[in-house]
Image (tube, rainbow, N blue to C red):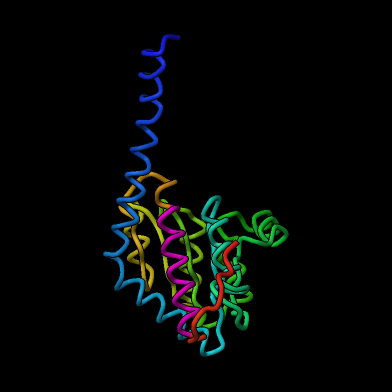
């Protein structure tokens, strides 16, 4: 391959990368428009934890990984050492997931667990890029029946799902990867503010890994 041809090919490979980075930056910047909803979500979570309740998370696939990640930030530590917070990802237990899926159907894997461990006053954080996952919708319905408040994170197609939650975040994109990236940003902001509200102190060192 000549130098000229190689240079053209390299530019062709770089173009999609640059476009992806630009789109991610645009969507992250747009998150500032959701500040009011973020403050409402923080108030829900902080109020629940102060009252001795728990924060539950759920999601599928990449969203399941983010649910587990965010639960761990609260149960462990975020920016500094402090007491652990009551947080759990419903998608973390393989035995529970497979048992409920086998006996009742996959759409009930989260709702069934909520019926056992959820209590009125808890908060459920549900992540779904599409807003159409049957098990997430069943979880929101079960939470409503129990008296659990709900925070939903979704993408452009999930506006109805977001509206069904007490606080709903919509990332204005159909790209699953970009949606999940902004969900993690919003989740980290949520965790940081929860920690700061419940443990008002100056961080001495970062606990990020």
Residue sitting at the far left: 33
- Write down the region rendered in magenta: 180-197
Q: Nearer the viewer, residue 192 or 149?
A: 192
On screen, 60 above or below 43? above
Quarter of image, res 22 = top left
Q: Residue at x 68, y 62 (%)?
A: 93
Which is the main secondary structure of the residues drawn in magenta? helix
**Residue 208, image x and y in percent?**
57, 65
Task: Give left or right: position of 51 versus 18.
Answer: right
Q: How many marks?
A: 0
**Residue 6, image x and y in percent?**
41, 16
Verify whether residue 195 appears in magenta: yes
On screen, 72 above or below 1? below
Quarter of image, res 108 = bottom right
Q: Residue at x 69, y 55 (%)?
A: 98
Q: Nearer the viewer, residue 178 or 207?
A: 207
Q: Quadrant of the C terminus?
A: bottom right
**Residue 23, image x and y in percent?**
33, 45
Task: Give left or right: position of 128 versus 30.
Answer: right
Q: Residue at x 48, y 76 (%)?
A: 145
**Residue 75, image x and y in percent?**
61, 74
Verify whether residue 52 appears in magenta: no
Residue sitting at the far bottom: 51
Task: Give left or right: position of 98 versus 138.
Answer: right
Q: Residue at x 51, y 55 (%)?
A: 63
């Amino acid at each position: 391959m000549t130098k000229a041809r190689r240079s053209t090919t390299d530019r062709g490979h770089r173009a999609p990368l640059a476009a992806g980075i630009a789109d991610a930056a645009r969507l992250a910047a747009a998150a500032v428009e959701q500040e009011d909803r973020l403050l409402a979500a923080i108030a829900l979570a902080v109020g629940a934890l102060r009252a001795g309740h728990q924060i539950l998370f759920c999601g599928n696939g990449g969203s399941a990984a983010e649910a587990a990640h965010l639960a761990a930030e609260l149960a462990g530590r975020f920016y500094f050492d402090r007491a652990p917070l009551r947080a759990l990802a419903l998608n973390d237990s393989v035995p529970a997931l497979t048992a409920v899926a086998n006996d009742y159907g996959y759409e009930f894997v989260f709702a069934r667990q909520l019926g056992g461990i959820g209590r009125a006053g808890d908060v459920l954080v549900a992540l779904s890029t599409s807003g159409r996952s049957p098990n997430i919708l069943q979880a929101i319905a079960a939470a409503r029946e129990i008296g659990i408040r709900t925070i939903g994170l979704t993408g452009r197609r999930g506006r109805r799902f977001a509206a069904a939650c007490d606080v709903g975040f919509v990332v204005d994109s159909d790209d699953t990867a970009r949606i999940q990236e902004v969900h993690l940003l919003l989740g980290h902001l949520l965790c940081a503010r929860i920690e700061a509200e419940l443990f008002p102190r100056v961080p001495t060192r970062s606990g990020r890994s």
